[in-house]
Image (cartoon, rainbow, N blue to C red):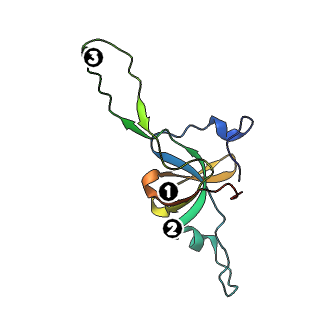
Amino acid sequence: MIGVSKDNKLKKLIVVGDKVLIRPKNPKDKTNTGLYLPPTITEKEEVQSGYIVKVGPGYPLPSFSQEEEPWKNTEEKVKYMPLQAEEGDLAIYLQRHAIEIQYEGEKYVIIPQTAIMLLERAEDLF
């Protein structure tokens, strides 16, 4: 599993809002009895899994500035409620919410955090 480091191509990507960038795991292409399945069958399953590569900042929170006057022109800093998902987690997600992209020859999916059903966080996943 590749992560984001200073010298790789993923540092240029910025995930926005509550979105998560996932590198899908290779689905089983063979049944228990030894029958090989075409890629169209395995990609259309409703539930998929993959490793989280990058996460967005989270959900933007409204700002409540009571000490300032509303007509003053002030620079507003946006605050975010962070996501539960973290880089390196194994995610089980709903495929119907996934948007597939190709980035420099690799296949990734972008999903909102609400499409994630389960996260597995362990040091020994890789």
Q: Is residue 67 left or right of residue 105?
A: left
Q: Nearer the viewer, mark 3 or mark 1?
A: 3
From the top left corner, tell me how far across and down residue 32 is, in percent: 66, 84
Mark 1 or mark 2: whose residue is earlier in sequence: 2
The residue labelled by disc 3 is 67
From the top left corner, tell me how far across and down residue 73 is, in percent: 32, 12
Alpha carbons under labels 2 and 3: distance apart: 48 Å
Above or below 21: residue 122: below
Amino acid at the residue labelled 2: Val
Alpha carbons under labels 1 and 2: distance apart: 10 Å
Above or below 50: residue 80: above
Under circle 1, the secondary element is loop
Mark 2 or mark 3: whose residue is earlier in sequence: 2
Mark 3 or mark 1: whose residue is earlier in sequence: 3
Structural crowding at the residue carrying mark 2, measured as other residues with C-alpha within 10 Å and reported as few (<14), some (14–19) or many (≥20):
some
Is disc 2 in contact with disc 3, using a CB cutoff of under 8 Å?
no
Query: Quadrant location of the N terminus?
Result: bottom right
Under circle 3, the secondary element is loop
Q: Is residue 63 left or right of residue 106?
A: left
Structural crowding at the residue carrying mark 3, measured as other residues with C-alpha within 10 Å and reported as few (<14), some (14–19) or many (≥20):
few
Relative to the observer, which residue lies in front, 27 or 117? 117
The residue labelled by disc 1 is 98
Amino acid at the residue labelled 3: Glu
Checking the image for residue 47, the label placed there is 2
Is disc 1 in contact with disc 2, using a CB cutoff of under 8 Å?
no
Query: Which residue is drawn at the image coordinates 41% and 24% (left, top)?
Result: 77
